[in-house]
Image (tube, rainbow, N blue to C red):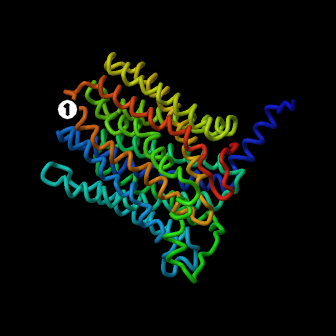
Amino acid sequence: MTVTSPIQALRNIKKTYFSPRLMGIGFFAIPYGMMYFMAVKNPQIWLKEIGISNTYIGLFALASLPYAFKFIWAPAVDLIKIPYLTNRMGHRRSWLLVIHLLLILSLLALGYSNPTQEHHMQTAIIALIIAFLAATQDIIVDAYRIEILDKKETVPGISMLIFGYRIGSITARAGTLYLAHFFSWSLAYTVMALLVIVGVLATLLNPEPKRPEPNRSDLLYNTIVFPFRELLERSRLWPAVGAFILLYRLSDAMINNMADIFYLEIGFTKTEIATVNNVFGVIATIIGGFLGAALVRKVKLFGGLLLCGVLHTISNFMFVVMAIIGNSLPMLYTAIAVENITGGMSTAAFFVYLTRLCNLRFTATQFALFTSLWSLQTSIASISGKLIDSLGGNWIMFFIITVLMALPGLFLIIIIRRYPLGNRGEIESAG
């Protein structure tokens, strides 16, 4: 058995995670990780502050609907060239530049909107526009990542994606809440809009990936129809795969949609939520992401999916304990640490699985379809506010119900392991 010295281990880590291509994925992932929180989660706290009901706040999650339907326009991202820019920068980078610039403008518009009862639709529409642009950003970044990394870089690439995503979410959640608390929501959104320039710089400094040119003789069919047909023709088990993608993290979506409202109701302040949930918690998620990727490489893909999913389901009972104990900072730290580490692990395993499902000829369209199904969880979770109101504010029962919702997704892992993966028709794959 070969024993690796600590120095050699550090060299291996540097070689694996600090290559220019992997570092580029990490920087692209920062604005990638900001947008859901800027469009959905932060406005929910803003609405709670001005006295909007939990039912409406829960429904605000519907602003995330573009994430669920992005597969519809994903083929256009592969097909349409940006005038002038595509010839100068390449297909993926030209799209990334335009989308990041539009996101900056949209965040500024949301920050200066007025989300009161009389004008809440204006805020909701702007949030919907941000979600549409962010969903398009997801399509391009995911396609870029899959196309520019080779197979050996897939798992490290997922780790860097999650790392950058969580840095972006720390920035978007904690940064916004601190700025809103000490200054104003308008200033908070202005600062966050300026930070999206990181995505612009990453676009300008990173290379264009090499990608197969579509067959121009039958472009519409090859770009739109065949990517979906290819998935259906692999195996008759495709409905189970779709159900798994939809259900694997549905419990988590239900809890996350109302978590901040729960914290506020049991007496935590915005700054406490920002510090514990959005700084400490995100760091815990980053650790979990690296652990999950390492676990997938160790026990193989489906074993990693099952183990990470089971651990995360068990960890969600921490919310039940917190609902019983009430306002306790040590308990909040403990619950967030356990829940977020296991959540990062299950997210990493899940992203590896979605990546392995893709045929490299159709990365943008197929990965967009998979993540659209996943994002549909957030829209389903919009009922969580109504559910807690119908339970009379019984948070203990709410969390028990949501944890039970994780069981169908775990069961489906037994079935989907027989569905072929990627280009090679693999049934089981090592990390």
Q: Nearer the viewer, residue 172 or 90?
A: 90
Q: Residue visible at 48% across and 76% down? A: 80
Q: Residue visible at 62% across and 75% down? A: 213
Element class at badge 1? helix
Picture coordinates of residue 25 (x, y %)? 59, 54
Q: Amino acid at mark 1?
A: Ser
Answer with left or right where residue 138 lies relative to residue 267: right
Q: Residue visible at 61% across and 39% down? A: 302
From this viewpoint, which residue is outermost toward the top? 325
Categorize mark 1 by other alpha carbons within 10 Å: few (<14), some (14-19), many (20+): few
Picture coordinates of residue 193 (x, y %)? 39, 56
From this viewpoint, which residue is outermost toward the left? 118
From this viewpoint, which residue is outermost toward the right? 1
Which residue is the site of mark 1?
390
From this viewpoint, which residue is outermost toward the bottom? 217
User: Looking at the rendering, in which quadrant would you find the C terminus?
Assistant: top right
Picture coordinates of residue 209 (x, y %)? 64, 66
Q: Nearer the viewer, residue 409 or 152?
A: 409
Picture coordinates of residue 423 (x, y %)? 66, 59
User: Looking at the rendering, in which quadrant would you find the N terminus?
Assistant: top right
Answer with left or right where residue 304 lies relative to residue 64: right
**Number of numbered labels in the structure image:** 1
Establish if 282 lies above or below 155: above
